[in-house]
Image (cartoon, rainbow, N blue to C red):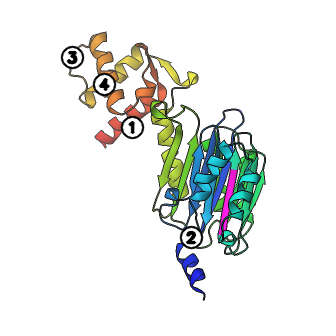
Amino acid sequence: MPWILRQIKEWISVTFSIVGFDPESGELGVAVASKFLAVGAFVPFARAGVGAVATQSLTNSDYGLLGLELLASGGTPEEVLRQILKNDPDFAVRQVGMVNAQGKSATFTGEKCFTWAGGIAGPNFACQGNILVGEETIKAMVDCFQAEKGHLAQRLLHALLAGDRAGGDRRGRQSAAILVVKEKAGYGGHDRAVDLRIDDHRDPIPALIGLYQLHKLYFEPPRPEDILRIDAILRRTLENHLRDLAYLQEGPVSDEKFYEALNSFQLMENFDERILENGYIDVQVVNYLEKMVQGQRG
């Protein structure tokens, strides 16, 4: 076997991925899974208001870094891919998906990518993979993404799961990642709205979906339908739970002490985004508090 092919086989990122754009929210993102350690460190690139890129097979980060620069300069995904591929002597072993902030997309699979390899691009998405069980993986991802409603992160993750369940990487499973960007939509006003990875796991995609559920719990504000008024019955329940967790002492509790204890609990558990004015509480916080107390008792 020629030296370069030996190197490709050693360093190849055996991967299936989807890049997506949500025209309603303006979010851009990438979801990826692989029989490869920490695939999230190499494949996904995204910039708010610009685009998202997945670079895989014989991964070349220039496709992500330079690709985003060229997209920011006004090039379409097809134009950007053509320009980068033209200057890459190893283009035959590359696989890339791109989408921009106008929903235009492109995917490329080099002829020397290990089979099954290929991709599908359409409005607001590009989906691609290599060393897959078959093309049904990509088709399942596309069907799921187009049919799914909800936040972009949820659509990308469910598409990834659909691809995995349709066959996925024929070598197995190891890691998965998701990156979603939007201007000032992340913690502290940064652009990374969702940035999660499972680096080494027997079934990484469900584990990643579990992380995303935690992300929503900690970083999303309450939904209007989840806001509860703290009536007398709920107040007594919350007081008892806060006593069980040593946030309150036995005996009568003033309003000031109660809300001081409740807010201390919420801050200690990183529910900064879910703290409400006195008299109200998020049902997600109530459920979490109850689980903590049950865990302590059990």
Q: Splitting the image into 4 quarters, where does residue 107 fall? A: bottom right
Q: Which residue is located at x 52 percent, y 40 percent?
A: 192
Q: Earlier in the sequence, mark 2 or mark 3?
A: 2
Per the image, the residue denoted by label 4 is: 264
Q: Earlier in the sequence, mark 4 or mark 1?
A: 4
| Residue kind at label 1, given as amino acid type | Lys
Q: Which residue is located at x 43 percent, y 29 percent?
A: 285
Compared with 226, 204 (above or below) is below
**Are the two marked residues, 3 and 1, in contact with CB atoms closer than 8 angstroms?**
no
> x, y (%) of residue 35?
54, 68
Q: What secondary structure is the stretch in magenta mostly built from?
A: strand
Which one is closest to the eye, mark 2 or mark 1? 2
Per the image, the residue denoted by label 1 is: 291
Q: Which of marks 2 and 4 is nearer the N terminus?
A: 2
Per the image, the residue denoted by label 2 is: 172
Q: Quadrant of the image for the C terminus?
A: top left
Disc 1 is placed on an element classified as helix
Q: Quadrant of the image for the N terminus?
A: bottom right
Compared with 124, 276 (above or below) is above
